[in-house]
Image (cartoon, grey):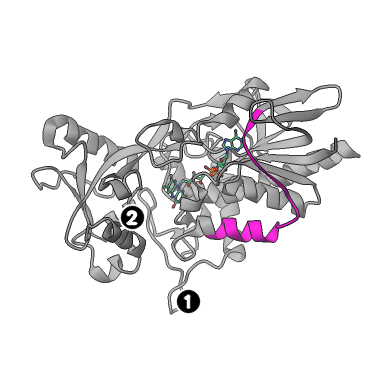
């Protein structure tokens, strides 16, 4: 059986970005996945492109939102490398040439860029198109990953006793574990497999009790259930109301964790509606709703709700795993003693430390592109060194 240089486990943006970087570095690559995880849902990502923004401000906002839980070196890498994305991606612009920007909760200035409101799907399609025929794409789940210390290679197995393969280096990009919860906006295949595989190889984890709740996940109608409503609407005039129609959030620009807590408190105090609260976008100017938020307008329209006139029933739901594998700025997976596990790399939501205890909306997409690239390059360099 042939030995692949780099095995990528996961077909989200972190995985495909790693595959792209590894191929560009001259490595042979196999990518295993069943589905694309959360990545096709990425609406926008953070890049400090505005004149009054900077890498320093981006770092400051991310550390502040992380509430003391961030790895500073990873945050600095995220923010510094994000700037290069502006040269690579044709982010949407206004007629005057300025970037179209949204301001996520926790950002001091508008920082979220996109491509046609769907940068995740756009980037995945572009990478897959470019890599067509250059990557061995295997549709399935990796169920076992082991290390052959005599040959310094990894063995991987698919399904229950299914096909197997050998690789010199591995990038784990299996996303988070929020698919395990009943009411979540994540698909059920996201259940933390990569963390389990890496821990069996001696990897350390961090912040495994930390999950970010999205405050505005639709409870009803059934057609939109579990689909989140974008919180940047709060900057455009949206508000929360309880069962009595009262506004209850004192700071509409608070971070997602604070908003989720305020919603839960309202529900627990008996002022909720059917287990949720009302997200009211009726005061958002029609011109903004019908352009910036047209996807939400259309989605609700198809479910029989006109959000120009009616509120949306929402509740907080597990959205992003904040904890995960411990990595360094080279995306090397670390053991509990802080040393890297040779040949094992990770990127994306499967890792911990970047967002601390509260992630800024838009930072996850940036994370997949920045760290997926680093992981792919590092894995290719490692594998080629072993092959010589
Ligand atoms: C509805 C929604 C909207 C979001 N919008 C935004 C946004 O606008 N901006 C932003 O920054 N972030 C957003 N996020 C967060 C962001 O989508 C994720 O953090 C990001 O996509 C994670 O990318 P990833 O590549 O690490 O994992 P994923 O994209 O989740 O991909 C994981 C991959 O691993 C595969 N996998 C899992 N286990 C195995 C296994 N055992 N074997 C093989 N493959 C396996 C899965 O099939 C999948 O292909 C959103 C999240 C959700 C749920």
Neighbor class of circle 2 (other Cα within 10 Å; few <14, some 14-19, many 20+) is: some
The residue stretch that appears in magenta = 122-143
Spot occupied by residue 248 in the image (x, y as percentages of width and height)? 15, 43
Spot occupied by residue 266 in the image (x, y as percentages of width and height)? 17, 36
The reply to whether the C-beta atoms of the residues labelled 2 and 1 are less than 8 Å apart is: no
Which residue carries the number 2 mark? 232
Spot occupied by residue 272 in the image (x, y as percentages of width and height)? 16, 38
> Which quadrant of the view contains residue 263?
top left
Task: Tell me the residue at 23%/56% (across/down).
Answer: 238
Q: Secondary structure at mark 2?
A: helix
Q: Is residue 83 visible?
A: no
> Which quadrant of the view contains residue 201?
top right
Asked if the magenta segment contains residue 339, the reply would be: no
What's the mark number on residue 277?
A: none
> Which quadrant of the view contains residue 256?
top left
Task: Tell me the residue at 80%/41% (across/down).
Answer: 5
| Frontmost residue, 190 versus 279 | 190
Which residue carries the number 1 mark? 97
Image depth: mark 2 or mark 1 in front? 2
């Amino acid at each position: 059986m042939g030995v692949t240089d780099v095995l990528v486990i996961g077909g989200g943006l972190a995985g495909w970005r790693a595959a792209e970087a590894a191929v560009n570095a001259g490595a042979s690559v196999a990518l295993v996945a069943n589905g694309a995880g959360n990545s096709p849902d990425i609406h926008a990502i953070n890049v400090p492109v505005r004149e009054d923004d900077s890498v320093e401000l981006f770092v400051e906002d991310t550390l502040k939102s992380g509430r003391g839980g961030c790895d500073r070196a990873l945050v600095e890498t995220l923010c510094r490398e994000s700037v290069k994305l502006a040269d690579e991606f044709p982010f949407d612009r206004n007629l005057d040439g300025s970037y179209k920007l949204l301001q996520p909760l926790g950002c001091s200035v508008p920082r979220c860029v996109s491509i046609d409101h769907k940068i995740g799907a756009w980037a995945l399609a572009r990478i897959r198109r470019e890599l067509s025929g250059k990557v061995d794409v295997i549709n399935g789940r990796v169920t076992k990953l082991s290390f052959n210390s005599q040959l310094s290679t990894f063995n991987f197995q698919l399904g229950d006793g299914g096909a197997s393969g050998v690789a010199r280096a591995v990038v784990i990009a299996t996303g988070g574990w929020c698919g395990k919860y009943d009411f979540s906006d994540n698909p059920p295949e996201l259940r933390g497999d990569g963390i389990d595989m890496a821990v069996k190889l001696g990897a350390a984890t961090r912040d495994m009790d930390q999950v970010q709740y999205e405050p505005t996940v639709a409870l009803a109608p059934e057609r939109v259930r579990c689909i989140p409503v974008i919180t940047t609407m709060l900057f455009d005039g949206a508000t929360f109301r309880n069962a009595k129609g009262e506004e209850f959030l004192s700071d509409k620009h608070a971070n997602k964790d604070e908003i989720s807590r305020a919603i839960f408190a309202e529900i627990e105090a008996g002022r909720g509606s059917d287990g949720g609260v009302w997200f009211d976008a009726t005061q958002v100017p029609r011109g903004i709703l019908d352009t910036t938020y047209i996807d939400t307008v259309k989605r609700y329209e198809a479910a029989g709700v006109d959000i120009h006139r009616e509120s949306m029933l929402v509740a907080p739901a597990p959205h992003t795993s904040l904890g995960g594998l411990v990595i360094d700025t080279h995306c090397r997976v670390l053991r509990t003693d802080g040393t890297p596990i040779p040949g094992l790399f990770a990127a994306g939501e499967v890792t911990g430390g970047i967002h601390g205890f509260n992630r800024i909306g838009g930072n996850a997409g940036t994370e997949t592109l920045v760290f997926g690239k680093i992981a792919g390059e590092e894995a290719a360099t490692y594998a080629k060194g072993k092959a010589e």
